[in-house]
Amino acid sequence: MKAVIIFDRESATALSDDLKQRVIGLLETRGYRTEMVELTRGDAAPCRGCLLCLTKHPGACVTTDMVGEIARRMHRDREGIVTVFLSPALFGHLSSPIKNAMDRGAGSHLLQVVIGYGDDIDDEEESTFIDTVAKHRGAADVVHPGMDSEVTVYVTRSPVDNAAICDSLRDRLGRREMG
Amino acid sequence: MKSVCLVNGSLRGRKASSLAFVREVSRRLPDAHYRKTFVTVRGSSRQDYPGEMLRDMAEANALVLVFPLYAYGLPGALMRLLEDFHRYVQAGNACNRDAKVYVVVNCAFPRPEATTGEAVRVIRNFCRRQSLSWRFAVCIGTGPVVALTMRVPRLDWKLKRAFADIAADIAAGGGDTKADCFVHPIIPESIIRRIKEHYEKKGGMIASPDAH
């Protein structure tokens, strides 16, 4: 099994570096082949909302950049990849490069792990971040077609949170491997 | 003279429902009484937003953010604008901390109360971080349908009243934050669902992996 870790290089902090190392360590310990994708703002143009990736040519984005290539690959290998998104949680929202990547289909159809980070995130921002991702993946009564995959979302404010997230993720992956 | 900055958060150009809503809000703010600036988000992610654009936003007395809902959150292009604005203010540039902030969010689904809450919360968090004055949101279900019908007399009265409320609130002094307003399309939800299903089926939106 392969795991693609997508993170926002321009928003890296000591906290996100610690998180990234722990997540890579966890995945490799469990036998995943890991691939790092370091996105900058220039690598991830925003989704234009044309819907052609859903209607005319499934899985292929009209914008050709790094994210377009990832989206194409995710569509092709949808059953064999786990995606981990690491994003700063600014105002309780994904950063623009990570949001653009998710909107354009760079997430796995098997399992997506979304982790928001920030030293000074307040409780409302944490809750907003979690609720938005949860709603996207089925908590609302309306779900985007073809986007009913499993997702798990966390928010971290400290290395202690990072450790707890990895413990939870270990259990999550263990249950998936067992089932 | 008060200044108002109207932000179009859509990348769909002239076809955008958000642009139609921006124009409707603008129509209610007479040029004789307001200095209006318009900002449209950009499709290119390689360059930062220009300083003059961010200054227009930072110095405005009122900020009206109009955008389509993207996966229950903000469009990435609008998030990029807010990130650049955040950095601009953090860098010590002047910002009108008394500015009032309004949101007009349009979503593809007929019941906006079920879908738009988180995107509005993000803007409220943005206001809290920047110490701006959050006012209220107008949440529109099936935005493209409402954009087509809103100029017809006697239809979409709730939307027209909501836009008039934005204009009146900008003109007025402070006061309490108002409740968000939810606008539903005039076409019944069952018909909208059937139209949606028709196009999903026609377009093969749930496609098999080897379909391309």
Image (cartoon, coloured by chain):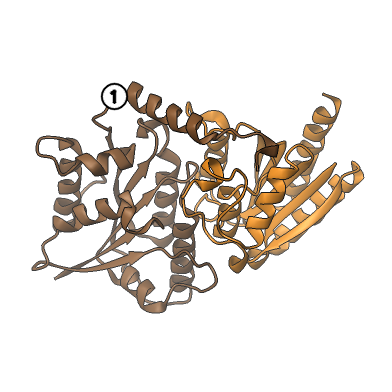
Chain colours: A orange, B brown
Quadrant for residue A57, please give it: top right
Residue A37, percent from left and from top? 73, 59
Q: Residue at x 13, y 71 (%)?
A: B1
Q: What kind of element bears circle 1?
A: loop
Quadrant for residue A123, please give it: top right
Q: Please indicate, yes or no, whether residue B97 appears anywhere in the rendered image.
A: yes
Residue sitting nearer the eye, B165 or B105: B105
Quarter of the picture holding the N terminus of chain A = top right
Considering only vertical position in the picture, is B192 above or below B5? above
Residue sitting nearer the eye, A160 or A129: A129
Quadrant for residue A58, please give it: top right
Left or right for B161, reference B11: left
Left or right for A21, reference A52: right
Q: Residue at x 72, y 37 (%)?
A: A111
Circle 1 sits on which residue? Answer: B188
Residue sitting nearer the eye, A41 or B17: B17
Considering only vertical position in the picture, is A154 above or below A175? below
Q: Residue at x 65, y 50 (%)?
A: A71
Residue A52, percent from left and from top? 51, 47
Residue sitting nearer the eye, A110 or A116: A110
The kind of residue on which mark 1 rests is Pro
Q: Residues within 10 Å of mark 1 (few under 14, many from 20)?
A: few
Q: How many marks?
A: 1
